[in-house]
Image (cartoon, rainbow, N blue to C red):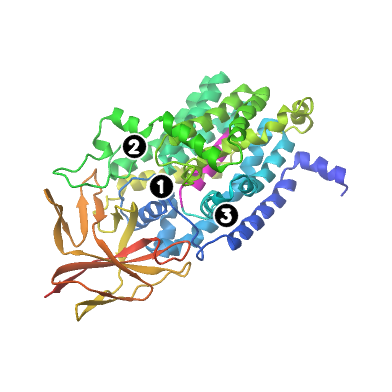
Amino acid sequence: MRVAERLSLARHEPWIVLAPLVVAQWVVLAAFALTVQRNGWLFYQGGDQTWFYTSAWELAHGRIPETLVGYLWPFVLAPLALLAGPNFLDGLPVIILLQVLVLAPIALFSAYWIAARIGGRLLGYFAAAAWIVAPFAAQPLFVGRYHERWNEQTLPQALGFTALGDFPSMVLLLVAAVFVLRALDGGARGDVIAAGIVVGLAIALKPANGLFVFAPLAAFALAHRWRAGLEFALALTPALLTLAVWKYRGTGISVLALDPSVLAAAAEPPPHPSELPWWEQVRDFVPLDIDQLNHQFLGFREYFWSARLLEFIPVAGVIAVARRSIPKAAFFAVWLAAFFVVKGSSPAVSVETATIWRLLMPAWPAYFFLAVSLPLLVPVWGARLPERFPAPIRVVRWPRRALVPVALLLAVPLIGSTLLPPSKGQGAAKLPLQSLFLPVDQDVGLAVAPVEGGLDLSWRAPKPHSAESFFIVYRSPLEYTLSEGDPRVIRQGKLCEPTGQAPRCTIEMTEVGRTRTSRFVDRVGPGQWTYRVGTAANWLDDESRGDPFVISRPLNISVE
C-alpha cells in the first residue's frame, strides 16, 4: 500500500495508527518497569493502597468495612482479594496487569478522541503519541536532585504500577471527557448520560473526583445546553446514591471522607468529621489557602526548568481551544482549576515531596490537552488543521447487551452496600501512625518459649512471591488505658470505637523489632503481654523502611 493511501486510510480508520501506538505503549511501560528501582512487583506506593485492598478483603468476606474511601475500587477488587488472600502483595501483580494492559490503552484511546474533538484527527494522533512520551520527556526539565522523585516515586503512580485509586480515577475522567466533548459536538442524549454515569463511577472510586463535575456543567451552560446539564446531573444519581448508602452503612455520611485524627491524650476524643457541623466539614474540605497555592508555584520555580513555562501553557492552551469552541475551552480550564485550587490548597500537597503529582493526577489530563492544543495557535495552518483532518462523530447505537455491565457496576455495589452487614472490627484494623488499614487475618501459628531475659518468638507465616518481604513484631500489655485520664481500655493491642455502623478499630501496639526470619527474641520483663506479627515490604527492599500489609491475630503471654 502506498504512503498516500495509508495516510488516507488513517484519516478514516484511526485504529490503523492507534493499534501500533498501544503496542508501543506496552513496550515503553515494560522497559520502564525493568529499569526503574523496584522490589519485584512492588513499586513505590505512598498512598491509599491498603485502604482499597483491605476494604476489598472485608467485602470478599461479606462485611462492610470502615468506609473512609469510595466503594467502586473495593468492589472491583473483592473477587481478587478473595482468591489472592489478605496480603496486598499477593494481589498486586493482577492489579498492575489490569491497569497496564486494560486501563492504559483505554487512556491512550481517550487521549486520541479528546484531542480529535478539539482539533481534528491529526491532532488526535499527535496527542496519542505525546501521551506515551510526555511522562518521560518531562524528566529532563527538572533539576537533577528531583529526578529520583520523578522517576521512582511519581512515574510508577502515573503509569499504573501501583494499587492507588488515582490512576483509575484519571482513566475514568478521561473517558468521561470523551463523552462530554461528543455531547457538545453531537448533542446525543446517550453521550450525555454516559458522561454522567462515568463521572458518577469516578466519584464512587474517590469522592474528591466530584470536583470534575463543575467542568461539564460549565461547558453545557456556555453552550446553552441546559437540558444536557440536567440529564448529566441526573445520570450521576445512581452512583451518588450508592456512595451515600456505602458511607452510611460504614462510618456514617460525612462531607469529608477523612482519616480520623490520631487521638491525643484528653478526657474525651475529638469528634469524628461526620459529627462536625456541615460548614466546618466544607471549610476543611475546601481550604482555599492562597499562601499554600503560592507555595506550589514556588516549588515549581525551585525544581522545574521554568515556572513561567508551566504557567504559560494552560493560558495559551485555553486561547487555542477557545478559537475552536469557547465551551470546550471552559471545560478544560474549569477541570484543571477546580482540582488545582482545591487540592493545591491542602497542606498535604507539595512539589517538594512530589505529592502534588499524585493527588492532582485526575486533573493533569486537562493540562496535557491544553498543551497539545498549542499548534492550533499557528497562523493559518492551525485554523485549517481541523478542516483538513476532520473527526466526524459516529453515532453510537448502544446494543442492549452493553447495558448489562453498566447495570452490574451500578446495581451490585448498591445491593451489597444495602444488604451486607457492617464489620464488627474482627477482620481489619488501622495502624494510626502510618494511616494504614490492614487485614487482621493472618494465622501465623505464633509460638513462644521462655529464654533467659525474655521470650523466644517463632511463627509460620507465608511469604508473598511478588516481592521480598520481612516481618515486624509488635507488643503491648494485654490490657491498658490509652493515656492518663483517658478511660478507654485497649485489650490485646486493639481499640475499637463505634462510628456509624462499622466500628473504627486501631492497633495500639509498639514495634519491638524487624526480621527476615521467622524468629525473634524479645527482651521483656514480667507481665501479661500481647504479640502480633506483620508482613511488610517496600520498593527498596530495605528492612529499616516500609510498612506492614497484613497483621496477625494476637498471642497473649504471661511472663512471671
Alpha carbon separation for disc pair 1 and 3? 25 Å
Question: Pointer 1: residues within 10 angstroms few (<14), some, or many (20+)?
Answer: few
Q: Position of residue 305 (x, y in %)?
A: 61, 41
Alpha carbon separation for disc pair 3 and 2? 31 Å
Residue span colored magenta: 164-179
The residue closer to the viewer here, 162 or 313, is: 313
- The tag earlier along the polypeptide, 2 or 1, is 2
- The residue that label 2 is drawn on is 256
**Magenta region, main secondary structure:** helix
Image quadrant in which you'd find residue 459: bottom left
Q: Which amino acid does label 2 sit on?
A: Leu
- The tag earlier along the polypeptide, 1 or 3, is 3
- The residue that label 1 is drawn on is 412
Residue shown at 46%/35% (left/top)?
295
Q: Which amino acid does label 3 sit on?
A: Val
Quarter of the image where the C terminus is located: bottom left
The residue closer to the viewer here, 268 or 132, is: 268
In the image, residue 167 lies in the stretch drawn in magenta: yes
- The tag earlier along the polypeptide, 3 or 2, is 3
Question: Pointer 3: residues within 10 angstroms few (<14), some, or many (20+)?
Answer: some
